[in-house]
Every structure is written in structure tokens, then in C-alpha cells.
Amino acid sequence: MDATRLRELIEEIAAGRCSTEAALERLRTLPFADLGFAHVDHHRALRTGFPEVVLGEWKTAEQIIAIIRELAKGGVNLLATRLDAEKGGEVIAACGGEYDRTSRTFVLKQREIENVGRGTIAVVSAGTSDLPVAEEAAISATMMGNEIVRIYDVGVAGIHRLMNHRATIDGAEVVIVCAGMEGALASVVGGLVARPVIAVPTSVGYGASFGGVAALLAMLNSCASNVSVVNIDNGFGAASVASLINRKRGEAP
Amino acid sequence: MDATRLRELIEEIAAGRCSTEAALERLRTLPFADLGFAHVDHHRALRTGFPEVVLGEWKTAEQIIAIIRELAKGGVNLLATRLDAEKGGEVIAACGGEYDRTSRTFVLKQREIENVGRGTIAVVSAGTSDLPVAEEAAISATMMGNEIVRIYDVGVAGIHRLMNHRATIDGAEVVIVCAGMEGALASVVGGLVARPVIAVPTSVGYGASFGGVAALLAMLNSCASNVSVVNIDNGFGAASVASLINRKRGEAP
Amino acid sequence: MDATRLRELIEEIAAGRCSTEAALERLRTLPFADLGFAHVDHHRALRTGFPEVVLGEWKTAEQIIAIIRELAKGGVNLLATRLDAEKGGEVIAACGGEYDRTSRTFVLKQREIENVGRGTIAVVSAGTSDLPVAEEAAISATMMGNEIVRIYDVGVAGIHRLMNHRATIDGAEVVIVCAGMEGALASVVGGLVARPVIAVPTSVGYGASFGGVAALLAMLNSCASNVSVVNIDNGFGAASVASLINRKRGEAP
Amino acid sequence: MDATRLRELIEEIAAGRCSTEAALERLRTLPFADLGFAHVDHHRALRTGFPEVVLGEWKTAEQIIAIIRELAKGGVNLLATRLDAEKGGEVIAACGGEYDRTSRTFVLKQREIENVGRGTIAVVSAGTSDLPVAEEAAISATMMGNEIVRIYDVGVAGIHRLMNHRATIDGAEVVIVCAGMEGALASVVGGLVARPVIAVPTSVGYGASFGGVAALLAMLNSCASNVSVVNIDNGFGAASVASLINRKRGEAP
Amino acid sequence: MDATRLRELIEEIAAGRCSTEAALERLRTLPFADLGFAHVDHHRALRTGFPEVVLGEWKTAEQIIAIIRELAKGGVNLLATRLDAEKGGEVIAACGGEYDRTSRTFVLKQREIENVGRGTIAVVSAGTSDLPVAEEAAISATMMGNEIVRIYDVGVAGIHRLMNHRATIDGAEVVIVCAGMEGALASVVGGLVARPVIAVPTSVGYGASFGGVAALLAMLNSCASNVSVVNIDNGFGAASVASLINRKRGEAP
Amino acid sequence: MDATRLRELIEEIAAGRCSTEAALERLRTLPFADLGFAHVDHHRALRTGFPEVVLGEWKTAEQIIAIIRELAKGGVNLLATRLDAEKGGEVIAACGGEYDRTSRTFVLKQREIENVGRGTIAVVSAGTSDLPVAEEAAISATMMGNEIVRIYDVGVAGIHRLMNHRATIDGAEVVIVCAGMEGALASVVGGLVARPVIAVPTSVGYGASFGGVAALLAMLNSCASNVSVVNIDNGFGAASVASLINRKRGEAP
Amino acid sequence: MDATRLRELIEEIAAGRCSTEAALERLRTLPFADLGFAHVDHHRALRTGFPEVVLGEWKTAEQIIAIIRELAKGGVNLLATRLDAEKGGEVIAACGGEYDRTSRTFVLKQREIENVGRGTIAVVSAGTSDLPVAEEAAISATMMGNEIVRIYDVGVAGIHRLMNHRATIDGAEVVIVCAGMEGALASVVGGLVARPVIAVPTSVGYGASFGGVAALLAMLNSCASNVSVVNIDNGFGAASVASLINRKRGEAP
Amino acid sequence: MDATRLRELIEEIAAGRCSTEAALERLRTLPFADLGFAHVDHHRALRTGFPEVVLGEWKTAEQIIAIIRELAKGGVNLLATRLDAEKGGEVIAACGGEYDRTSRTFVLKQREIENVGRGTIAVVSAGTSDLPVAEEAAISATMMGNEIVRIYDVGVAGIHRLMNHRATIDGAEVVIVCAGMEGALASVVGGLVARPVIAVPTSVGYGASFGGVAALLAMLNSCASNVSVVNIDNGFGAASVASLINRKRGEAP
């Protein structure tokens, strides 16, 4: 996947060994890889300062450790998500770093995290059962160089608790709302503040919650027009979107 | 289905023409109908003061008019629900009474409606599109002898509007909440007041609202434990449940 | 979250150090918390006599024990729901009280339960498999200060068993019906009695019962108009709604 | 698709022009049609006395008329189902016979319908809205040579009406139950009688009835073990199954 | 629930201590139980010869053993369904009888099973994975006094295997077809024979089979009009329906 | 809903006619409305420069015209969405302004639209059938003060067309992607650019697209972590979210 | 989107005005379009002989006519699908060609269709109601240069009709099976022949067919391992896949 | 199930002991089995060179070993799919051969695998989590006599990786695409190459992926018309279809 063939072609053109038409033809039919590296570099450049991320869910502890060791060589910061406690224990035993049981995340900080955001990201959650998802979002966004404000346990059944935090939430650049059961919190927060709201339905609930579907549908049908939605329990995805929104432009995402 | 056979049997027993054992045997094997009228009477008694109700949805205008004429003979009040404007027009042309376009209801008041409730029923709705369902509930509950307080257009995207009515809602005996889209209003109202809340999901919405399913699921998964739910757009059902809750005991439902 | 700032403001106004307009402005922009305590107090007042409730499902035994110990300090009665047998054992070992395996509830009675109801709550269940949900409802409602009548194992496949209890059910203020599989019992009971019926679909069944969805849909589509529905297996929610309906007004919920 | 090739082969064998092995080989590779007529004949034989049936739903009036004219040549009785009123009018104008608006069926009786049943088929329906499906079942079963008992409008919200007919239903060979909304009637009838019950969910209902799905699921999950189910609104299918059950063996189906 | 009150009333009437009108009134308001025993007796009578049945799924081994011991006192035959191997082992250790691992059924034969059927019941299954359901049907139907013909592993992907058994299947009074995956076997068998077909979708499959839903829908939509359907994996239900169809009338079911 | 009562209270305090404690008490129990205006004002302030929006879907032409006339008095810009051609015609006849058939939007520009964005919003669509939704998004976002770049008809079945626009898309502040059928475009765009992507599933498709559900699910499950999703066909919602993201902070949304 | 910039670059290199490194850099950052045309050409080349296709479903008659006129200039053959009769009439009035009501297709043959297949494509359908889909497939495949064998009305309820055609079907290169309702035909055909089977579920059916979902699920769960599936009613898609399978390699698709 | 009866009949005809008419009659009523063997032979012949396949999912290790031993006697190659690691270990301990943990397949090669394909089959997968399904497809297709090209981890979130392999994929006879989550890869590959694409949705994902349903729907709705779909996780089925497409005609499948 390197650019050898392309370089050779350029040299042939320069040497006059290849006519314009032939060069044109050969360039057009070169496998994408020879040119495509620009994309790769560009992408990598865009991600400067961003942690490397490992999705732990369908990998064995051995696989995760191997990947972390490989990635860690670059001296970058590392984030692994969706690690159960057993895998988490094996990973910190092998690689150091920190494992957080609530969010099921592993982080390895090898360098200072640079704050690349214009403001804060508010992470709001409905109940204590939504904490794992809210914390996955908060820790992920922290690792991506954002300042986080946590506002937890402000579900709509006790709306006054939420009201007390209206100013804080409205002061954030972007708001992440994590809620299960009926997922109403996203609409209420969306109605209270003039900021983009990333709603994360959680799988908290039983019976007709259908593993988060009730909350997902509620959030998609929000009467507040500043709400967009990510997948059920996808705290990491919400952090990624929020981080891109918060990021000072010119900065890598 | 009359009680003739039963009367004959009693007379035979009284006349000594039928032994205890034979009477016992014959009573046990009598068709239910001969005894069952008690139930019918009892039911009818329970409903004193209640309007007769005609569900108009799957009936033709002719059928509805015929039923109304028959029922009206008793001098009772009459309620017909789910009549489209065309049927409604034909019915009032034939039977008099009033037709309401918003709620698609027809009412024929032949006697004073007696207030049989302990307090008021609050009917709360999220948006103007939920009005048809809210009004079906309000008009139905009125016809059942309840005093109604209407609090409309207080959806969660502007929570302060709802807050202004908290005391009124809390002062009702029972609250009916009509909301479509994400249906979050039921949870918010449920959290605000210490009254039973009957939630009515409406089919207002599009896309992933699936004709009211999103609101229905939200309401079933309410984090407020004082919420119970009726079918999508079932304003009449909500009125019936609320009316029974509000009714002074001893009164017929 | 206390009222200090508000008090200071009032004192400034009284002292003439703050004009009417300025006071108006500052009042309007005070964080909600400073005013909102009224709501909290009000809510707490409303709940006098009601047990404190802990939802055990997504908490560890340690968390539940800690919460119970904290709440128990007030001398109130305590109810914990959805505790499996293992958690239940740990909780009673640590806190005393009683654990009930069938309903998976824990109760700690520190004071006499005051009867705050106008009448009885009938808890009706279809089959023996529905007992855990029915008992969660019955025990919860008992803890909320209601007198309970239990009528179990009266499913519609043997309708005569149900018929024998018609008078008892009709004598209750409100009826809770727990049924899985086809959930038909709610409609039949609803047709028999002139009381509000709270239907609880249970997850009892297999195949096309879809974990209680068949019963849920049946109950939502009940041809009896006095039926409202709570979430699948939500015995506690049914008890809460029924308790509010049964409660003598003026009493806290 | 005639048996010519087979006859020729037999004659060749008989004439000694074809060895056993060659005959075996040729028989095995003959197209199925040449042998398959037995099946066709057998099927036709089995159907003696049965009406020819035309499903009208996705056919134009012209197509239906053409098919009816062709089939009518044999002097048999004819049944067409799922004809809307417009098609029905065109068909009787062209072919004579009778069209029934309620059941949307057309029948052409060219010969006496022979009673081929051991007993009666009871057709039971919950509400007046279920009549079209119940009548499709009743008329279809009549055309198939069965004696029908109609028991209509006995839904579970007024269980005593049903009770009055228990003996009649139990006296039938087989029972067809048509019900929409929550579909509870099938379970209640199944529990009352010791006969096979064919349940037909109807699309009567709204909101969470999902066009008959609620009733369908209820019927599939019936706690009565003598209930089997056909497709939503499939009155004709129920009649076919019931007719086969009722039929005196030895008789064609 | 006994008839004491009724007997007393009859005696009062006979003694002239109760007028006809008063008797009529008191009879009408007697609780159903006092009269209802007739139904119970009648039902029990209908079931003569039928085994007692215990559904083992949601019961503990101890509960099942206790029920079996109680029921066994009457000397009747006993069938328990949906017992896993562990429960099965405990039950036969305690009660004797036989446990079958494939069908997960337990049977205790205390008397000769009387053949009460007009003909045979054919049990047809698609693949070896459908055997548990097919055997639950076959063993249940055997215990109900029917002669069974088993035709297994004749799925539609090798249609010639099925064809070889056409005559046998057609010779049965009624056919039970068990199939998972696409459930096509029910339609093919329905098209081949002129008998009532009871289709049992099985949960065999993966992915888009959704635990038997694909097969269930296929069977409900069968283009063969002699097919009716029971719940997913409901071999016992199919046996019950088939047994009632096969039963010589006059016989108890 | 005015602040009269609050003003009176302040004046009483200032006049010494109300003690601190009494003032505190009265403030706490004032209806929310008296204080809540702050919220309303604040919200209105936040929306400066934003058009007034009318959702036309469930309103009659008369209702829409009345609302537009009322809102237009303020001299603001106006946007109405989801107007079919007939309503659109009536509205421009009555109110002037412009109606766009493709997007089914009406706009009335009474003042210059001020560009309040940091950069551009790219609106990307898969096929020509997605145009109505894409244009609803583009026109809405334009009215909200954003510069729009339209990149249409770049579905994944011809990926090179999309590739040609990579730089343009990457240069936007935020990207709206509208796609029906399999909705893959959101993931592909999300993978190509380092910007927040708002995905709008459209109802374009047939069969197993289920009115946009296939695209919705695809977008929620995007393997690109910079994608969040709004409701099916919700171009306006996407514009609102994108506009808030693009908006220079300090500006009203 | 032309190659001008690329040509200029090559000429600069050839002229020695651009170093290898600079050339490499500039090539890497050229917009994809300048190189991407190769793909377009390649694709177009691959499609030689293939008709141009217009999907008529969401286009107006005017739009379709405009597109057809534009495409027709090249002298190619044209296929338009999913045109209702009204649009079809307008199109042939404006453009000539042929419109087929059953399949709702329009074809304009401007040159001889070259047979590019290795063998035949068999199009098999279950019932007459599946004809529109089957004919869409057959006509589309014909236009793509394939020889078609039609085998219609061979549904599984009369399996012998299908058997008669086994040899013909097995002789095809690839088989398209169109079936609605329970969709069993795909499995049966798949089991009979050793050819790839493309299954097309049709929306024919009612009730629990859910617009073709029952057939779709049946086909996805086929026990025959040579079956793959396209979307509901997607006759054109089936034709495209089948055509690619049948095509002599080296030929354009 | 042998042909004895048929042979006897032929001999009787040849001997003149059976008239033409009688022979015709007896042939028509012979059970299918006597003729049906041709089908069996034909099928077996068609499968020459194909491995015998055992589906391990619902079988015990003992059952699998017994089947393998029986089948292995014929000296053929053997493939077993869906064996978990434990079963796999037991099988190779008992039977030799190789077990692959990733694909959960067992293979026993007793003879050289003959290449029966016209070209290669490309197996393309989106992410490393899709490997088990991709490898099940690749190993199955290898055992069926095909040459495989594996292109893994080319998901659409990094489209340039896929682009690099375009030529390779286009060079294959047929392409298998395995992808979970949003399943977009099938559409992108379908748009890039002019080959038939068999799409395999995988159950990789969480939340709203619903166990592969999101990917399945995306693939069924592909805007690329050369895509057909098999069941979720059905790598073996994809291999079977692809193998039939790739196979040189005249060869057994």
C-alpha cells in the first residue's frame, strides 16, 4: 500500500519515458492504494491529540492487550470501551493504566490531555442506573480533550431537580442526555436549553422498554427540535459527536 | 331469556311437586339466562345517570341514527364517538343534538347531567394536534357527570407553561394526559402531582412515531409510578376510567 | 439548594436596599433551587405515611443495604422490590426485616401501617405463574396503607371460578388484574364489575407471547372501557396507581 | 399432462419391445405429469359436493366473471369471497346468483347443497363489527354442506350473554370464534366447551390493535388448549377447517 | 363454594316460608358458586379417560412432585410437560413413571389407555431438530387415547421423502405438522391431503427466524385452506386440538 | 401569567408590611407563572434572528393562514413546513411569500437573513427521491441564517460521485445526510469527513424499507462514530441541530 | 470533473517543471474526480448491451418522459419500471414504445437485444396474484439479454403442478421464484433443483402477511441452502442478479 | 423404498399378466417412493465432489461424532458447521480432522478437493468481529471446490481500504459480503463491481442492531441491484449459493 509505483511513474514521466496520454492512462488505472495514502495521512492528521480507541466488546483479553501494546508504542493516549470487569482486570495487570468498573472503560494516559474544546460538554443522566452509559460518555469525551460537567440523577419524575441545573446546562457548548425507560429527559432538556442535545437511549428498563427501544423512539420523536440521537447505550458515540461539535475549528477532531 | 322457567320451578317447589334434591338438580342445569338477568339488571342499575354510548367508527350513518333513535326513547342522555364530519352532519339532521368536529363526538342531552364526582378531572394535552383526543375525553367525561378542567398545549418542550398549571392539576381528583410524539408529558405530569394519571398516547407524529407507538411505549415505561395507560387515541376510555375514579361511591358509575 | 439567597434578597428589599424593579429582576433570574424547595417539601408532605421505596433490580446488595440503612434512620417503613433471593438474603442478614421469595420484595416495618384507604383493593390473578407479580402488587399496596383482597388462579379458561368471586371484586374500590399469556382476564373482570381496573400484563407465556407483549396488547385493546394498563410485570406500579385511587382525599398519597 | 406416453410405454412392455430394465429407467424419468394425474383426480374426487371457490380480492370484476362463467359450466355450486360491493354488483348483473354485502361473498347455487356434516358448526362473534368475518365463515361453511348455528355479539365485556348460549355452543361439532380488539372471546369459549375451537382474529380495533395483531397474539397464547388459529379476517379458512372436522368420514371434504 | 345456601333456600320455598317473588329475588342474587358446581362436574365428566396434565415449565421439582402425588391418588393417568432433564430425574425418583428426554415429558400410567379416536393422528415433522415438539405432541396425544402415526424428517428441501408418505398422511383423521425455519411443510402437507392440519411452528432456526416467528407467520398465511395454527413449540396444544377432532362423539374429550 | 402578584409582594416587603418569613413562604407558594416569565423572555431572546416556524402538517389552510398573519405582524421572517401543494397555494394567495413544491415549505422574508454561522452546512443526499427532505433541511437552515452547500444524488451505489465532493463536505462545519432505502450514505460520509454528521433517514423505499425504518436502523448502527440521527423525513429537525452547531456562540440560536 | 488538471500536471512533470516529490504531493491531494473518471468509464463499459433503466415509482410522468427522451438519444434500449397505468399511458403517448399493465413496465427497443446468457433464466411464480412481480422480473431479464422460461401458478398447495416442471427448472442456469403469502415455493424449488434460486417475496396476502414480511422471512429461513433473497416485490432486482449469474463472462453485465 | 414393486409390475406387463388399463391404474396408485428414487439418485449425482455437511448447532457431540463416522465411511470429504469449541474438541478427539475456532467449523479431508469453479469467490468482510461468519463462508466454499480470495476489515468507515481492493473483487466470479451493524458494505461493494453479490448480515452490533436485523434490512434495501441476501450469520448458505454460481456447468453442484 505504499507509493512506490506512483513514484516510479512520475520518474518515468520526468525522464520522458512515458507520454502524457500513457501517463494519464496509467494513472487512471493505478490501484487506489497507491494514491489513497493521502487520505490515510490526512485522516491521521485530523486525529492528532485524539486518543486511540479499542472497542473491547467482541475481543478477548489477549487480543485487547496485544492491540493496546501495539498502539501504546506511539506514546499516544489510549481508551478502551465495553470491557467487563474480568477483561479490565487482565488488561491493567498487563498494561498498567486505569480501569473504571462503572463505565467499563480502560484509559492509558501517556501524555497530557490537551483541552481542544470551545466550552464544556454537559453530561446529563436520568437515573443512577444510567450511570454506566453517562460515564462512558464522560470519560470518552474527557480523553478526547473536552471539559465535562456532570449532572446526574435528574429524571423527569422530579423535574425540580433538573430545573436547578438549567443555567449550567445552558452554559455548555453541547449537551449529552442519557436516559432509559421512557427517555423523556431528552425532550425536557431540549426544551430548556438553546444548545445541541445528543440523546443516548439506555437499555435501562424492563417489559415494554424492549431493551431501550422505548427510550430510543421517544428521543427520535422529540418535540424539541435540537435533539439528535445515537444508538442505545452508545455513550462513546455521543462523546465523539459532542467532541466534534465542541472542538475549536482548525484543531484536529 | 326471561325468568319464566325459574318462576315455574319455584312454584313447583312451593307446591311440593318437586323434592329438594330434584330442585337442586334442575336449578344447577338451568340455562344461565334464566338466572343471569340479575347481572343485567345490576349492571343497568350501576349505570344510572351515565349516558348511553354509541361507538360510531365502524357503523354507517343509517345504523347510528337507528340506534340513537331507539336509545333516545328512554329519555336518557346520549353520546356517540368517532363520527367523521359527514356522519355527524347526517346524525344531527336526523336526530337533533350537537356534533363537535374537533372531538368527532355527538351528544344528545335529554336531561340535566348530574354531577356525580368527588372533584374535578383535569384533561391535559401536549399540543394542538392532540386536541381531538383530549376533547373526546373531556366531552365524554362531562357527559358522565364530571366537572372538567382543560389545560391544553403544555408540551414538555416548553416546560414553564406546564409549571404554571401545577396547582390546578394537583387539585384535580384524577388527571388525563393526552400526548403524541414522544409522550413525555405523562411522566412529567406524573412527577409533578400526587394524583392518579391516565395517559392517552395519541397518533400525532410521523416517521418513527409509528402511529402513536412511541408515545404508548414511553407512557408504559413512565418513571412516575402513578401513571396507567389506555389505547392510542382512546379519549373515551380515559374518560371512563377517570369517571369511575372520580365518582362518589354509592353512585352508579 | 437552600433558601439562603432568597432570604437575603427579601431582607434587602425590606431594608430598602433593593428597588422593586431590581427585586423583580433578581427574583426572576434566581436559580430555581432557591424557590423550588417548596415543591420538594410539598411532595414530601404528600407522601406522609407512604413507605420509602427502593428499586432493587439494577443495584448490588451492598448498594441496597446502604440505601436502606440511610432511609431507615427516619423511622419510616421501607419497601424494596425486585430483589432476587440472593440479594434478599444479604439484605435481611444486614438490616433485619422480611424478604418474600415469591414477590421478591423486602419490607421493613418500623411503625404501624395506617389504613388510609376508602375501601379495599382487590388483586386478581389468572394463574399460579402470575403470583410473583400479583404478590408484588399486594405487598406494595399493603405497605402503602391499603386493605387487600386476594383472588388468585381465576383465569378465563375456567370462568366459573371467577364468577364465584364477582361480588367480592365488585365490592372493592379498585381492582388490580395480573395475567400473562392472552391477558383476557382483564377484559372479563372489567366487564363484570363497575370499578376501575388496573391491568398488569405478566411475562408468563412462551413463543408468541413475546415476554408479555401479547397480554399487554390484549389489555390495551380491552373492550371493557374501565381498564387501564401498566408495564409488563409492574406490580408495584399497579399498587401505586390503585393506592392513589383508593386513598381518602386529604390523606397523603 | 395426459397419460398418453405412459400408455404407450405399457404397450411397448406388453409387446416385449422394451426390457424390464429399460422400462424401469423410462418410468423413472417420465415427467411427473404423466403419472401425477392420479393426484389430480384423487383431489377432484375428494372435493365432490364442495363448491368451487374464487378469491375475489386481487382480481378485477371482468376476471371474476370470466372465471365464474367457466366454472359454472360444470353445474356446480360457486362461492366467491372478498368481493367489494362494486365488484359484487357487476358479478350478479353478469352471472346471476346472490351477493351479500356484509360478508362480501357471492354465491351461485346450481344444485341442492347436501348436508355432509356429523353435526353443526357454531359461529360465535364478539361484536357487530366482527360480523363481516363471521358471515364469511358462516356462508362459506353453509356452501360446503354444513349446518350452521350463529351466536353473535357475545363479547367478553358482557359475559352473561355468552353464558346463555353455552349449551348450544357445546352441542356443536366444532366452534368458530371471530373476535377483534383483545380477542379474549376465543379463550373464554375454549374454556366453556369441550369442542375444537377455530379462532379467527379480526382486524376490528384501532391503535395498538395493529390491524388484528393483538387479537391474533391473544388467540395464539390462549390458556385454553382446544384453540387453534387462522389468519386475521380469514373467515373462509376457518370455514374450511371446520368443515373438514365436521365432515362425515368417507364423504369428500 | 358448596350448595348449602341453595339447599336451604329450596327447603324454605318448599316449606312455604319464602314467596315466589322473594325466592326469585334471592336466587338471582346468590353468588354464582352455589350454582356453578354443575359446570365443574360437567367439565370433569367430559374429561373422563383424559389424563390429568401438569405444565412443568414455571414450577419447581418439589411443586411438580406434590401436584403429581395429589393427582395420582385418583388412579388416573398423568402427563407432565416441559420438564427439563433435571426436574424429570427428580420427578421419576419421587413418583416412578417415565421421563422422556426428547419431548421433556413425564407420564405415569396407572390404567390402560382407552382408544377413544375414530382414526389415527399423523404427526409430521420437518427436521430432526423439530423432534422435541413433535414428540411432545405424539406422547400427549397418545395419553389422550389416540393412535399415532409418526412421519419424521420429511422437510420440503427433499420433497420426495414426504411424497412417499402421502397415502399414510391422507389416511389419518387429522394431521399435526411441526416445522421450524420457514415452516413451509404445513402448506405442502395441507395441499397434499384432504384432512384438517394443525400446524405447530417450532423455535428451530436462527437469525431472521426470530425464535419461530418466521414459521408462525408462514403457517398463518398458508395458501392451503385446511391449516390452523397453535403457538410456537406448543406440541401439547396441537395434541389437544387433534384429540378433540379425532374423538368419537359421545366420548369424553 | 403576568408578574403583577410578584410586584405587589415586593412592594409589600419594601413597605415593611410583610415579614421575611412570610415573604419567603408566599414566594415559595406563588404559582410558577408569576416567576416563569423570565424563562419565556430568555427563550425569546435566544431566538433572535431565527424565523418563526409553523408546522403545517395537521393544520388546515385556514389555521395556517391565521397563524402566519398573527406572527407576521412582528416583522420577523417566517417558515412553514409540511404544507402540501394545495395548502401552499392557499397560503401564498392569502399571505404572499414563496411556496416550494419539492420541500413543501413556505417562506415569508420580511427582513434580511443575517448569516450567524461559523461556516457552511453541507446538505448531502443519496438520490433524487430524497430531494424533498434534503430541501426541507436546506431551506430551513437557510432561513435560520446559515450558508448551505448542496451535494445531491451521490448515493453509495456510485461511490466515485461522492468521492469527488469529499473536500467540499470536509470543509463544512457540519454535514446533513439524507438517505432512504439502506441509508448507507451516512456511514460512508461519516467515514470520509472529520465533521459532525446529522443523518436523516427518508421514507424513500418499498417493501422491507418499512417507510424509512431500514435507513433509520442503519444510521443508528453506523460504524462511523461521528453520526447522530433525527426522525424519518425530519429535514427541519436536522436543520435545527445543524444550525445550533454552526452558530457563532454569543449569537442567538 | 474532467481530467484537465491531471493532464497539466503530467505535462509539467514531463517538462521538468515539477519535482518527483512535488508531483507525488500534488497527485495525492488532487480531488478524486480528476482520477475517478476511469471508474465511470469502466462502469459504462461493463454495462454495454444492458438497457438504460428508469425507476418510475417516485417520478411524475413529465419527469419520466424527459429522462426517457434524454436517454433515448443514445439509441440504446430502455426499460422503465413501476409505472402505474396512467403514467404508462402518458409515456407511450409521448415516447412510443410499449407499456405492459401487468408488470407496470415500459420498454423502448431501439436495437436488437443480444442474447448474452449461458443458458435460460426460469421465472417461477406461486399464484396469479404474483404475476406483476414475476412479469417485472421476466421482462427486465429479457431486456438484459436473457432467454426466459416462465412457469406460473405452481404454488405449493398443489405440489404436483410444480413437479411436472422440475426438469425445465433444473435445466435453467438460474431460477427466480416469486411468491407471496407463506412464500414456501422458494424452499420447495430450492430443494428440487441444483441451481441458484433468487427468491422474491411478493406483497400478496392479507392480515399476518404484513405486506410480504411473512414470505420474506420464510425465504430468508429457507432450509434449502441454494436460496438467496431480494426485497419484497423487487422483480427488477431479481432479474439483475439472475442476469449477472447467467451472463457469459467477458460479456458486459 | 426400493423399486421392487415397480420391477414386478413391469415383469407382469411383459408376461401379459396385466392389461394396459390395469397397468396404468396400478402405476398411478403406486406409492411415490417406488418411483421417487430417481430423484434421490439424481440429487446424489449432482452433488458429486461436494462435501457431506453436518449442521452442528442443535446436535450433541455424541450425535455429531456418530453421523461423521457413518458419513466418513464413503471416503468423502466432510464439513460440520456451528460447532462450539467444546464440541469441536470432542469431535477431533474422536474423528481426527481439523477444527477451526473462528469459524466454528470442522473439516475432514479424505480426498483431494477438486476445483470445480470457473473463477474465484471473493469473501469480503467489514470488521474483525464479522470474521466468524466470513470464515464459515470461506471454509465452506473451499470445501465445495472453489478458490477463495479473502478481503477482510474493509468497512465503509474507512472506504479507501476497500477501494484498494476494487480490482481484486471485480475479478471474482461472485462476491460474498459479510457485515453487521449498518450493513452498508454490501451496497458499496455492489456499486463498485459488476458481479453478483451475496450479502450476509451478521449479528455483530448492539442496541438497535437487533441481532443483525439492521444489517439485514439495509442489505434487502440495497440501492445496488446486484445484491441478494441470505439469513443473518448464514455464512454456509452464502457459500452454497456462491458455489453454484461459480461452478462450471456440467459439473455437479
Image: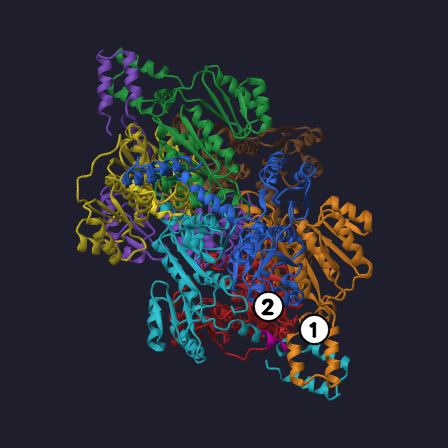
Chain colours: A green, B cyan, C blue, D red, E orange, F yellow, G purple, H brown
Question: On the rendered image, what quadrant is the C terminus of chain E found in?
Answer: bottom right
User: Which element type, helix, strand or loop, lies under badge 2?
Assistant: helix
In the depicted view, which residue is nearer to us: A151 or A12? A151
Question: What is the crowding at mark 2: few (fewer than 14 residues within 10 Å), some, or many (at least 20)?
Answer: many
In the image, what residue type sits under mark 1? Leu
In the depicted view, which residue is nearer to us: B213 or C51? C51
Residue D159 falls in image quadrant? bottom right
Spatial distance from mark 2 to mark 1, Cα to Cα?
A: 33 Å
Is residue G84 positioned above or below A113 on the image? below
Q: Position of residue D47 (x, y in %)?
A: 57, 69
Q: Which mark is residue E35?
A: 1
Q: Position of residue B104 (x, y in %)?
A: 37, 65
Q: Residue at x 75, y 56 (%)?
A: E79
Residues behind callouts 2 and 1 on a single chain: no
Q: Residue at x 38, y 58 (%)?
A: B150
User: Which element type, helix, strand or loop, lies under badge 1?
Assistant: helix
In the image, what residue type sits under mark 2? Ala
Question: Which stretch appears magenta?
Answer: B35-39
**Residue F154 seen by the camera:** no
Q: Is residue C164 left or right of residue B192?
A: right
Q: Position of residue F157 (x, y in %)?
A: 36, 37
Q: Main secondary structure of the magenta part?
A: helix
Q: Residue at x 35, y 76 (%)?
A: B96
Q: Is residue G55 left or right of residue D228?
A: left
Question: On the rendered image, what quadrant is the N terminus of chain E found in?
Answer: bottom right
Mark 2 chain? D
Q: Residue furthest front?
A: F16
Q: Which mark is residue H155?
A: none
Is residue A50 positioned above or below F106 on the image? above
In the depicted view, which residue is nearer to us: H90 or A63? A63
